[in-house]
Amino acid sequence: MAVSTGPGDRRQIYSAGLARWPYRILAVETGSPVSTVLEDRLSEVGVELSVFPDGASALICMSTEDPAVVLAPTEIHGVDFLCFVETVLKLSTIPVIVGLTSDQGSTERAYEAMRRGAHGLMALPAEPGQIVALTQRFAAPRSAFSAPRTFGLISIDPQAHRVEVSGTPVNLSVVEFAVLNRLMVAAPAMVTKEDLMEVDVGDGHLTLQHLRSVIYRLRAKLTAAAPNQPECIEAVRPFGYRLQS
């Protein structure tokens, strides 16, 4: 497999977001298979493949798929290959990996795509390990706020929007989840009320009264999942809150 790199800084309209786990790769259907193994086997090595029938549908869904990378085969259906690569690079910061197929002229198209800013190149079909290695090389790093973590009895997975207390699932609203996640990232340190009020809830920030209401509901839900355990959220008056194990 040949691997090359090229420039990749582009202005962002669609947001690639943070690289999720497993790595989601947005690909376009081609006459050549992407991998040497079936797609469901790729999940075993941390790859989730989203394959679209043509380039146009892949572009339409790019902003909602949250891919770590876009895999663009040189034999692409629905749109011109080089136009597809340029559009992804122009409208997003999502890295583009060119998949080299065996059709006539594919090598020339692949290297032209690299010249225009594609990030990497690999021959198709590729071994799962090769796909993972190249994806890891270019995927955006995960932020502390997106990584799964555990503190005391609480486990949180921001990518899956899942919270468990002692293995018991806890159903939280978006704002409750955001506040708990901020506390989990800082734990066991305190988070000030001002910082907690800055969590992104989609339609502005929290008021102090709203924050107190959220903390009240969080305490109730977390305690209900582990009724024989001490209260998880401690008030550090008059400054803020912290988790206690």
Image (tube, rainbow, N blue to C red):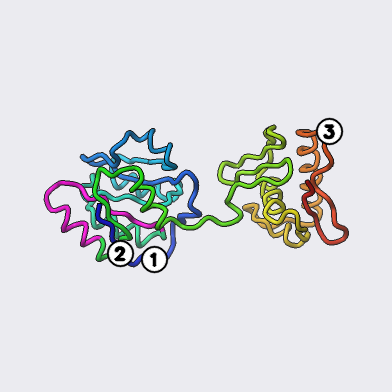
The amino acid type of the residue labelled 3 equals: Asn
**Which element is circle 3 on?**
loop
> Mark 1 — residue?
10
> Mark 3 — residue?
228
What segment is highlighted magenta in the picture? 94-113
Q: Position of residue 194 (x, y in %)?
A: 76, 62
Residue depicted at 76% across the width and 33% down the height: 225
Residue depicted at 47% across the width and 43% down the height: 22
Q: Position of residue 73 (x, y in %)?
A: 25, 48
Q: Is residue 97 magenta?
A: yes
CA distance for labels 1 and 3: 53 Å
Discs 3/2, front: 3
**Which element is circle 2 on?**
loop
Q: Position of residue 162 (x, y in %)?
A: 62, 39
- Picture disc at residue 117: 2
Q: Are marks 2 and 1 in contact (CB under 8 Å)?
A: yes
Task: Work out whether mark 3 precedes mark 2 in sequence or the reverse, and give the earlier one.
Answer: 2
The amino acid type of the residue labelled 2 equals: Gly
**Which element is circle 1 on?**
loop
Residue that sits furthest to the right in the current view:
237
Looking at the image, residue 222 sits to the left or right of residue 6; the answer is right
The amino acid type of the residue labelled 1 equals: Arg
Discs 2/1, front: 2
